[in-house]
Image (cartoon, grey):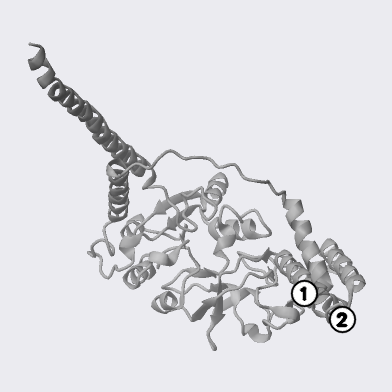
Amino acid sequence: MTARTDVHAPTTATTVHGRGRQPRRALSYAGVVALGLALLVLLALTAGRPTEPLDPESPGRSGAMALVQVLSQQGVTVEIVRSIGDLEASRPTRDTTVVVGDPTYLGQGATERLAEATRSAGRLVLVGVDGDQLDVLGLPVTAFPGVEVDLVARCTSSVAVDSDVVWAVDTRYLVDDGAEGASTCFTLPSPDSDSGEPAAGGEYGSALVEVAATPSTPATFLVGFGPGWSNQLVAEDSHAGTAVRALGSTPRLVWYHPGPGDLDDVTAGAGPGIWPLWTTPVLVLLGVAVLALALARGRRLGRLVPEPLPVVVRAIETTEGRGRLYRRAGDPARAATVLRAGTADRLARRLAVPRGAGAAGLVPAVSRATGHPAVEVAGILFGPPPPDDAALIRLAQQLTDLEERAHHP
């Protein structure tokens, strides 16, 4: 009996150990399944959340929910449609304004149907449309990329007043020669202009163009400062005023936000877009499932072993050490170059000077903001290198003074 018990003892232990693995493996599989189900619920909750620019239902920085709420408080009935078919079904009338806030998915076929569906509307507002879409709509205007620069309206219309200011210009529009019934506001200056005055004849385009109504088309407004109507920027300068005047002139507003299905739309019976809407969530879910399976089945690494650092160096000590290295190198020219580059970069951001403008664009702006003569500003920011440490200290003080005095014009 004793010998028999000794012979079978290892076999019994092995069997018990093998059975112990099975519950743990089942728990691992159950964990992967639970994680997949949780991700499915998360995707279902977030898949319909809008994220495109000027989406009327998006609370994000680039969305336009804030503007929609303001218009609703003003008594405007706002209807949101997300396909050209829904826009046609809304049947705009003379008491209706139609706005296209984001034309990214506005294909040629959808643009043609947009023109037909808005013939009886009271007003059509197009934000950031490009040249191809303008051609399909038959508007005598050409579109170009915009620049972020402060623009004053210098006109009076139903959308803008003479003193309005906008700056988030991502599209500029140039009216074709000989075109009739088109008026402009927020005309851009010449790129090399120091005064900021509009270019003669509007040769660099405008941020707002109004095309008068005809018997077959409504009054059409081309808006090139669409980012200014976003939740993030609508409260700055005159962005809110222009938005409310453009979109709140009629008791009813139809906000058309084209969807992917409108990108390749050609006829009224066109099918879905480039790929089904559920493709992206499914691909994301598959990727997460593969990653979870790899984590569940992969080899485990050992526990992390923290290693104490031999010494902790404070940030101020690093800065002082770098300063001592510059001083020991005896190269005030190099130090001056670093100081000037940092100051010029900060001043350019503060004064909204475009990148790459160089001394010709930065010096006049800093001169206007600080009151220092342009020659003096040019000498401080772009002058010859200091010959010694004393001159370097004076230059650092002058650069600090420029930054303290600079303010947005």
- Residue 106, image x, y percentages: 38, 67
The residue closer to the viewer here, 192 or 163, is 192
The quarter holding residue 400 reads: bottom right
Residue at 31 percent across and 71 percent down: it is 109
- Tag 1 and tag 2, C-beta contact below 8 Å: no
The C terminus, quarter of image: bottom right
Tell me: 267 left or right of 46.
Answer: left
- 167 displayed left or right of 87: right
In percent of the image, x 59 and y 60: which residue is there?
228
Which residue has dot 1 on it?
Answer: 334
Q: Amino acid at mark 1?
A: Arg
Task: Give the residue number, with chain letter if any, for mark 2.
Answer: 375
Residue 306 rendering spot, x and y as whole percentages: 53, 40
Residue nearest the observer in this picture, 4 or 59: 4
In this rendered view, identify the residue nearer to me: 190 or 297. Answer: 297
- Relative to 236, 176 lies left or right: left
Instruction: Give the residue at the far top of this rendering.
Output: 1
